Image (tube, rainbow, N blue to C red):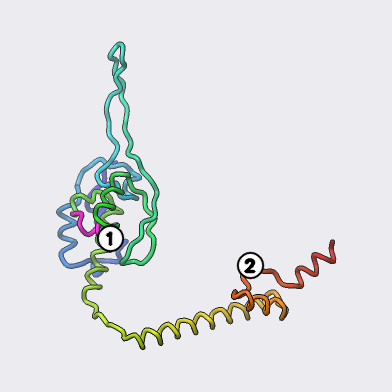
Amino acid sequence: MAFRSKEMMKKIVKNIGGEKNLASGVKQRLEKCVPKAKVIMGRAQRGLFAGRHIQFGNRVSEKGGNTSKRTWKPNVQEKRLFSYILDRQIRVKVTTHALRCIDKAGGIDEYLLKTPYHEMDTELGLFWKAKIEKLYEELGKMEVVFFTPEEETKLEEQFKEVKLEERAARREARRKMYGWSPKSELKADSEGTDGEGSLPTDFHEGMVANA
């Protein structure tokens, strides 16, 4: 389907959260590079296709040379790509050509940063590119702090204490909800777990009585 650049720009700016979240000069480059009239597959708006879209041609018979119209669709795969700036997996539909481009660039972040706007011919690609550029611009303004080995040891101990407190809170919540017995708690402590995946003793006693 053909799309209009104004509608596409409004969607991108809205998804990012407004013009204030755009990096300097990004809006002007978007307006210059966004295609104003181009035939693009509808599902390509929700993925990274790297210029690979539906193609049209003719099927020619071997004997009579008769022609009939046909189409070629790109090889689209649903993948999870890790983003370092977001520190999480991004689930996106990509073509095999786009996957090769991402591997060659060194990751999804590098691919979005290196690819110019006029080659990002899909709405999702332009949205992620503008968002990643804004995050990296904010990251460049942050100050880098280095910790000494003693400070790192203290931080590790604090993280361990927080994990133990969370485990104790979950154990207390399960005790109030299911009515755990002391035996199950001792067993969970000896196994080094917080009792996940185990059932209370009252449940086992009820099963034996019913049997």
According to the image, label 2 marks what residue?
A: 197
Q: In which quarter of the image is residue 140?
A: bottom left
Residue at (37, 53) in percent of width and height: 92
**Three-letter amino acid code of the residue under disc 1:** Asp
Q: In which quarter of the image is residue 57?
A: top left
The first of marks 2 and 1 along the sequence is 1
Q: Residues within 10 Å of mark 2 (few under 14, many from 20)?
A: few
Residue 211 falls left or right of residue 8:
right
Residue 18: x and y in percent read 27, 66
**Three-letter amino acid code of the residue under disc 2:** Gly
Residue 137 falls left or right of residue 210:
left
The tag on residue 174 is none
Q: How far apart are marks 2 and 1 (CA)?
A: 38 Å
**Viewer-closest of 10 and 186:** 186
Residue at (30, 24) in percent of width and height: 69
**Viewer-closest of 26 and 114:** 114
Asked whether disc 2 touches disc 1, contact meaning CB atoms under 8 Å apart, the reply is no
| Count of labels in the image | 2
Q: Is residue 13 positioned above or below 167 on the image?
A: above
Q: Which type of secondary structure does the marked residue at label 2 adopt?
A: loop
Q: Which type of secondary structure does the marked residue at label 1 adopt?
A: helix
Q: Does the magenta stretch include residue 23?
A: no
Q: Magenta segment range?
A: 108-116
Closer to viewer: mark 2 or mark 1:
2
The tag on residue 109 is 1
Magenta span main SS: helix
Residue 5: x and y in percent read 22, 51
Q: Which residue lies furthest to the top in this view?
A: 64
Residue at (34, 66) in percent of width and height: 86
